[in-house]
Amino acid sequence: MNEEHELPEPGEIVVCKVKQVLNYGAFAELVEYGNEKGFVHVSQVATRWVKNIRNHVKEGQIRAAKVLSINRDRKQIDLSFTKVSSNAQRARIEEWKQLKRCRKMLENLAKEQKKEEDEVWEKVAKPLLENYETLAEAFLEIVVKGEMAAKGVDKELMQPLLELVKKNVSVPEKTLKGVLSIKLLKPDAIDKIKLALEKAEKAAKNTKLFYKGGGKYALKVTAPDFKQAEKSLNKVVETLAKEIKSFGGESSFERSE
């Protein structure tokens, strides 16, 4: 966790809020560093030529920026928006939002237990951060594994923490989709396809099949993570292929993004 009196390091990607936009650049507050002010020169606002700076940056925006240089005596921080890719920007801002949510949860825990926030941080957050990179990661593990994932947390605060996390943190799900094509030329093809689809749908949990027309079926599989979703998807596709083949037909599968 960054302390307010500290300054970031050159090369670090920071989250900032744009406070003032001028023709020659923009001033922004570094939200993780006590709202220290940084400056983004117009040449660092966009990768292409900037005719009107306000078409690229607006007051109130939350952006991720790379620290170019720091004058620690004057506390002058030069920033760049152009040196942060769109993917890195999304990831960095999401990380910051997660930290805010986690801090709010600990703040609520302190209020519920009638304790100081600093005490809760020492007894809950610090032990968790010794085993996890972020509080968000720690809280997700606690939802899945319970007390065994909260090693080092103060015993008095353990149960309240478990209840708070399970109430406020949901396990993210990964959904994979695609289209199944079935070709079966038999007098009773409809009945046989129906049986094959029913068996395929039961091959993995959280599987849904929808008829799209023309012998095509939309397939959607949901699981707690990509690995499990991939495994379930393959199982459904393989089960259907096996059943359709046994009836003298054939099937294929095309993955959707």
Image (spheres, rainbow, N blue to C red):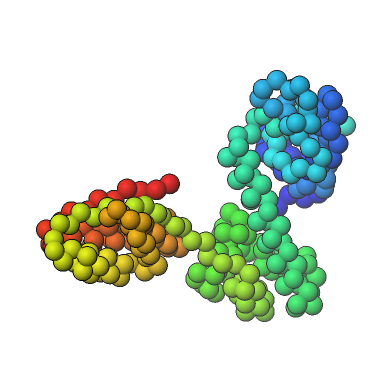
Residue 27, given in percent of the width and then of the height, sits at: 83, 34
Q: Quadrant of residue 128?
A: bottom right
Q: What residue lies at 78% left-to-right and 47% top-to-bottom? A: 31
Residue 55 visible at all:
yes
Along the line of sight, which residue is nearer the eye, 92 or 153? Answer: 92
Q: Residue furthest right?
A: 74
Along the line of sight, which residue is nearer the eye, 110 or 64? Answer: 64
Residue 72, given in percent of the width and then of the height, sits at: 82, 33
Residue 20, given in percent of the width and then of the height, sits at: 86, 36
Q: What residue lies at 70% left-to-right and 36% top-to-bottom? A: 65
Q: What residue lies at 40% left-to-right and 67% top-to-bottom? A: 206
Q: Residue furthest front?
A: 187
Residue 202, given in percent of the width and then of the height, sits at: 30, 70
Along the line of sight, which residue is nearer the eye, 14 or 200? Answer: 200
Above-or-below relation of 174 to 116: above
Q: Quadrant of residue 9?
A: top right
How many numbered circles does the render carry? 0
Above-or-below relation of 128 to 5: below
Left or right: residue 171 compared with residue 127: left
Above-or-below relation of 125 to 214: below
Residue 40 visible at all:
no
Along the line of sight, which residue is nearer the eye, 235 or 193? Answer: 193
Q: What residue lies at 88% left-to-right and 32% top-to-bottom? A: 74
Above-or-below relation of 177 to 124: above
